[in-house]
Image (spheres, rainbow, N blue to C red):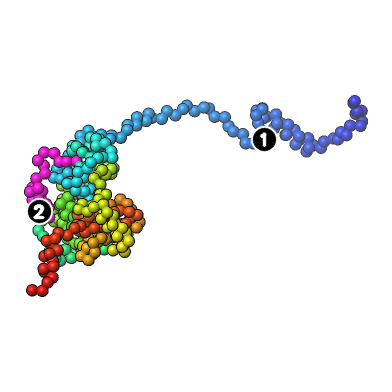
């Protein structure tokens, strides 16, 4: 339905309103882009760029596990994981891993691995030449003033040139650590803890024998190892590193069901007596055991069976302690139960007892 023209609410525009309307129409007609949306910002069209061609990456080559040539060392001793905690006289009865897997890595050492040690080849282990070279490296003996100066410099607990010696004892890789310290220091401080401290003489012997240095200070479990006057870091020996710790071989049983020289009933009685007796000492984990051997020897002068309380020490360390005490005291381990060690002093010969009685009688 069309309304008459007279009824339409037309109004006459002023000149200013007409000009504003004309400008608005002119601006809207100039935007020919159908994608224009005033509420949003227009994005200028860009020509597609050519893809950037990155330089070809070199093919990643896997790291060489087997070197071109195996390492050769002139050190005159067999390579073992631990020198102070193993004895070449001990013969294993089995292995926990194949002996063809050398801890030095495949093809990295010119010495064959037999499951326990990497033996030297040829006649390179001449002890006399090794001693001569050691004496040449040590040079003239240190004076008391020089020793006192070195001890004062390295004996404190805040010394940066320190190596911690744990239950592994004098290990093979520790030799390389000592020579690394000797590059910038005349001596190195060694702090010993755990089972090896039962025999500090053994530790000192292997440190001097394997590194060709000299112990100039020893106080309980603290050692200072001197490198020598004529030590040259550029002429240090080649020490191939062990890449992992080899599994310990299987050795014969330490504790027999029946102790040698006793019957089963006597052995059982001694074990019960030891378990019911008060402990001679209480050992802690990674402690200092330098006086344990002397305490056990003194106790065996009055008692026949001794118990050591090794709570929280660990089953493995308990057995290692028993092995060392068996050889150092000497004594016979009877039982390892609930981290308790029962030691028997063994049978005393009748001749020794008779001589002791005759010595105790007045003339």
Whole-percent x, y for residue 306 in the image: 26, 61
Asked if one can make out residue 57 in the rendered structure from this viewpoint, the answer is yes
> What's the residue at 18%, 52% (across, down)?
206
Direction from residue 240 to residue 142 in the image, left or right: left
Q: Which residue is mark 2?
A: 135
**From which residue to which does the magenta span run?**
118-138
From the viewer's perspective, tell me whether residue 141 is left or right of residue 16: left
Quadrant in the picture for the C terminus = bottom left
Res. 194 image quadrant: bottom left
Residue at the (9%, 40%) spot, across then down: 123
Which of 154 and 346 lies nearest the eye of the viewer?
346
Dot 1 lies on which element? loop
Q: Is residue 136 covered in magenta?
A: yes
Q: Magenta span has 180? A: no
**Mark 2 or mark 1, whichever is nearer to me:** 2
Mark 2 and mark 1 lie on one chain; the one further toward the N terminus is 1
Image-quadrant location for residue 69: top left
In the picture as drawn, the residue positioned furthest to the top comes out as 1
Question: Where the N terminus falls, by quadrant?
Answer: top right
SS category of the residue bearing label 2: helix
Residue 9: % across, % down: 88, 34
- Left-right relation of 157 to 38: left
Tell me what residue is drawn at x 20 percent, y 53 percent: 261
Residue to which mark 1 is pinned: 38
């Amino acid at each position: 339905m069309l309304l008459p023209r007279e009824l339409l609410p037309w109004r006459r525009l002023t000149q200013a309103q007409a000009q504003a309307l004309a400008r608005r129409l002119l601006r809207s007609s100039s935007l020919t882009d159908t994608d224009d949306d005033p509420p949003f910002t227009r994005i200028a069209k860009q020509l597609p760029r050519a893809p950037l061609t990155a330089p070809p990456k070199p093919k990643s080559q896997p790291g060489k596990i087997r070197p071109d040539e195996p390492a050769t060392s002139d050190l005159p001793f067999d390579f073992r994981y631990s020198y102070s905690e193993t004895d070449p006289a001990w013969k294993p009865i089995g292995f926990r891993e194949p002996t063809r897997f050398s801890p030095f890595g495949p093809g990295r050492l010119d010495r064959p691995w037999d499951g326990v040690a990497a033996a030297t080849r040829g006649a390179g282990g001449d002890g006399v030449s090794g001693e001569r070279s050691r004496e040449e490296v040590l040079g003239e003996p240190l004076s008391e003033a020089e020793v006192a100066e070195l001890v004062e410099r390295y004996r404190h607990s805040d010394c940066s040139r320190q190596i911690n010696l744990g239950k592994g004892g004098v290990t093979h890789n520790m030799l390389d650590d000592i020579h690394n310290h000797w590059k910038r220091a005349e001596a190195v401080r060694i702090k010993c803890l755990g089972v090896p401290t039962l025999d500090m003489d053994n530790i000192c012997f292997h440190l001097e024998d394997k590194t060709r240095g000299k112990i100039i200070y020893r106080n309980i479990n603290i050692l200072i190892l001197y490198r020598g006057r004529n030590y040259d870091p550029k002429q240090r020996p080649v020490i191939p590193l062990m890449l992992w710790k080899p599994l310990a071989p299987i050795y014969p049983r330490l504790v027999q069901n029946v102790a040698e020289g006793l019957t089963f009933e006597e052995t059982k009685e001694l074990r019960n007596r030891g378990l019911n007796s008060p402990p001679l000492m209480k050992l802690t984990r990674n402690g200092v055991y330098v006086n344990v051997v002397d305490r056990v020897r003194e106790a065996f002068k009055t008692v026949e069976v001794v118990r050591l309380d090794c709570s929280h020490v660990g089953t493995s360390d308990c057995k290692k302690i028993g092995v060392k005490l068996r050889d150092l005291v000497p004594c016979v381990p009877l039982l390892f139960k609930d981290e308790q060690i029962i030691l028997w002093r063994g049978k005393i010969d009748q001749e020794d007892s008779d001589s002791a009685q005759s010595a105790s009688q007045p003339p």
